Amino acid sequence: MFKAFVATSIALAALAAPAFAQDVASPDGVWKDKWGTTFTFSTCGDAGTQLCGVLNDVQGNSRTEENLAFINQQVVSADQTAPGKWEGQIALNGGNAKAIVEVKDANTLTITGCQGGILCQTLTYNKVS
């Protein structure tokens, strides 16, 4: 009886995992923060589990000479670590920082950038298209 329960639990868990992954919204598209900075994100890589992000425009306090040099360039490169979550690097203020990109829902995405492992900032983006 116990073996049947375990086998059934494993089978249900295997079926539930793909369904959960399908419920996560896609990161593909254009995303904009409250200041007007925009990124275009797309899944990339051989297996389609990596995330690539191109900086479209920079506004607000981030509109510096260093960041303007990255417009229309890929600035985010990350590997998927969980459904709707990618970890990698982002070009930031003339250097690179650790980045965590998370799709919260179909219209909300966050980017957390950390320099030196202690200086972290999270920005929220809304889907434009």
Image (cartoon, rainbow, N blue to C red):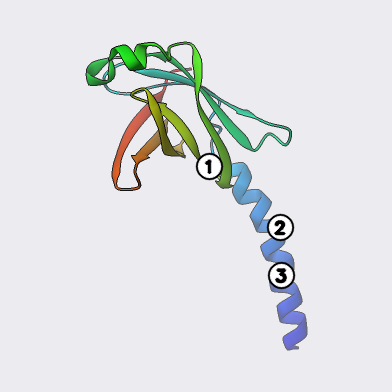
Q: Residue 128: give its label.
A: none
**Structural crowding at the residue carrying mark 1, measured as other residues with C-alpha within 10 Å and reported as few (<14), some (14–19) or many (≥20):** some
Where in the figure is residue 96, as x and y percent of width and height?
A: 42, 31
Q: Which residue is mark 3?
A: 10
Residue in front for this viewpoint, 27 or 117: 117
Under mark 2, the amino acid is Leu
Residue in front for this viewpoint, 111 or 97: 97
Where in the figure is residue 107, as x and y percent of width and height?
A: 43, 30
**Cα–Cα gap, marks 2 and 3:** 9 Å
Q: Residue furthest left?
A: 61
Judge left or right: residue 116 versus residue 127.
Answer: left
Judge left or right: residue 111 versus residue 26.
Answer: left
SS at mark 3 in the image: helix
Q: Which residue is mark 1?
A: 84
Under mark 1, the amino acid is Gly
Q: Which residue is mark 2?
A: 15
